[in-house]
Image: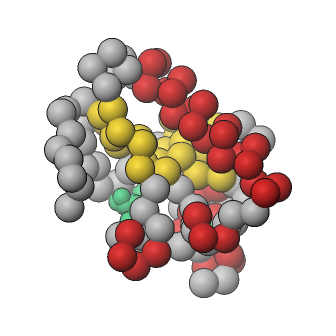
Amino acid sequence: MNASECIFCKIVAREISSKIVYEDEKIIAIEDINPAAPLHILLIPKQHIASLNEVEEQDAGILGHIQLTASRIAKKKGISKKGYRVVNNCGVWGGQTIAHLHYHLLGGREMAWPPG
Ligand code: 5GP
Ligand code: ZN
């Protein structure tokens, strides 16, 4: 998919509206439009990277930054003590539906394992 047609690039560019919970120069975190848990936030790098299959050594900083931000948001939203889940769906079998790298932060209920 071309980055100019990408839903998450459009959200980053404010061409599509979203409920933003955190933003800095590298990433944006938004509420998922179809939440799978009481708290469901998407952490999205502003740079268009199609999936975890496409990351390079140079992307290590952004990947670390996303995890640190997920941890901070979980604390701020009050879900850290009971626990939560951070998920990346990669490719067709991983269940990825939007071809712009993103991590799901899910919390507010007990999670099952293994995932479906
Ligand atoms: P994936 O299935 O690719 O791992 O996750 C894509 C996620 O993006 C889904 O949980 C879906 O509900 C969410 N989503 C799809 N379109 C939009 C949108 O326009 N706005 C927001 N906030 N979330 C979206
Ligand atoms: Zn994109």
Q: Is residue 76 above or below residue 6?
A: above
Residue 1 occupies quadrant = bottom right
- The total of numbered circles placed on residues is 0
Image coordinates of residue 15 in percent, x first then y, are: 61, 63
Q: Is residue 104 above or below residue 110?
A: below
Residue 72 or 92: which is nearer the viewer? 92
Image colouring? secondary structure
Residue 77 or 4: which is nearer the viewer? 77
- Res. 18 visible in picture: no
Residue 78 or 93: which is nearer the viewer? 93
In which quadrant of the rendered image does the C terminus lie?
bottom left
Residue at image point 20% right, 47% down: 113
Q: Residue furthest right?
A: 58
Image coordinates of residue 93 in percent, x first then y, are: 36, 76
- Res. 96 visible in picture: yes
Residue at image point 19% right, 32% down: 109
Residue at image point 65% right, 47% down: 63
Image coordinates of residue 23 in percent, x first then y, are: 64, 37
In the image, is 30 to the left or to the right of 107? right
In the image, is 58 to the left or to the right of 29? right
In the image, is 61 to the left or to the right of 90? right
Residue at image point 42% right, 62% down: 89
Residue 10 occupies quadrant = bottom right
Q: Residue furthest bottom?
A: 1
Image coordinates of residue 48 in percent, x first then y, are: 69, 66
